[in-house]
Amino acid sequence: MGFFDFFTKQKKETLDNGLAKTKESVFGKLTRAIAGKSKVDDEVLDNLEEVLITSDVGVDTTLEIIRRIEARVARDKYVNTSELNAILRDEIAGLLMENNTDDANGFDLPTDHKPYVILVVGVNGVGKTTTIGKLAYQFKQAGKKVYLGAADTFRAAAVEQLCIWGERVGVPVVKQQMGSDPASVAFDTVSSAVANQADVVLIDTAGRLHNKVGLMNELTKIRNVVKKVVPQGPDEVLLVLDGSTGQNAFEQARQFTKATEVTSLAITKLDGTAKGGVVIGISDQFKIPVRFIGLGEGMEDLQAFNRRAFVDSLFGK
């Protein structure tokens, strides 16, 4: 069971509110797609394909969803348009489950070693440092000792922002001078965490453009120095993506997964956009678990991703 599993009524309300713009957009398009139709036929499926693609689910994932619904229509012979929402819920939840995205899985902290080292990657502006701060808060609320590493040494604002989060949450931040070797900061962070018997380490990394080879080489270097202190580390490489960028988030995921071994995803800023369908497409295309979704500015608004709750909120009544 993951660390952030408990799905409360308050979290459900936050999820519903956070996905409201996407749901309103999808429902409006879906209503038009089935207008005047009593059963799901080829025309409805063509219209549904357009709804999903324009909701940033992505072409390949949309075609897979349509294929599954076609198979269901062929099997059941007659499918009412009134059943379409429930069918979409079932098929998309099934798709997410196949892609290793379980319900509210968060991070499972092992009992055989510590600290649990999470390397956080992503381009500037996606909410990377904010996500680290919120994770640190939630780990601390769960009684864990947390260390933060300011390895984005190329931007003063990034180090400053992480230090502000450290103060807010009440956790130590390991940093060096501007322009220092990021791998050196990572080494110091993990070494300090080991010496002080910390449970979790979150390391912020440089967020320069994902198409710059130097950044990717730097990530490899950081991974290697972490292993010198914690041989099994990093335990996770968490890629943070901005959900409001839609298809650009796909491209960022493509570049980062090529360059480094990404093990989990956090998709942020879903509350300010109608592009929430990107969560479904990215999970399907990259077969990487979506661990967290960002639904607002509050400390609790970073939620462990619950696939069933997500599709229920998106396609529910």
Image (spheres, rainbow, N blue to C red):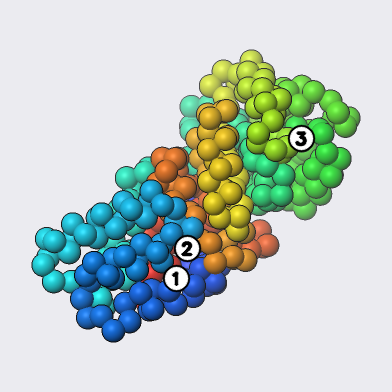
Q: Is residue 235 visible?
A: no
SS class, disc 3: loop
Residue at the disc numbered 2: 55
Image point (12%, 65%), residue name: 76
Q: Is disc 2 surrounded by few (<14), some (14 to 19) or many (20+) residues within 10 Å?
A: many
- Dot 3 or dot 2, earlier in sequence: 2
Mark 1–mark 2 Cα distance, whole angstroms, equals 7 Å
Image point (42%, 43%), residue name: 285
> Which of the two residues, 252 or 98, is positioned nearer the viewer here?
252
Left-right relation of 255 to 88: right
Q: Is disc 3 surrounded by few (<14), some (14 to 19) or many (20+) residues within 10 Å?
A: many
Task: Check residue 26 in the rendering and tell me which mark sits there, or answer none.
Answer: 1
Q: Are marks 3 and 1 in contact (CB under 8 Å)?
A: no
Closer to viewer: mark 3 or mark 2:
2
Q: Is residue 298 visible?
A: yes
Residue at the disc numbered 3: 152
Image point (76%, 49%), residue name: 165
Q: Amino acid at mark 2?
A: Ser
Q: Are marks 1 and 2 in contact (CB under 8 Å)?
A: yes
Image-quadrant location for residue 307: bottom left
Q: Are marks 3 and 2 in contact (CB under 8 Å)?
A: no
> Which of the two residues, 196 or 16, is positioned nearer the viewer here?
16
Image quarter (top left, top right, bottom left or bottom right) of the N terminus? top left
> Which of the two residues, 209 or 311, is positioned nearer the viewer here?
209
Q: Is disc 1 surrounded by few (<14), some (14 to 19) or many (20+) residues within 10 Å?
A: many
Mark 3–mark 1 Cα distance, whole angstroms, equals 38 Å
> Which of the two residues, 114 or 21, is positioned nearer the viewer here?
21
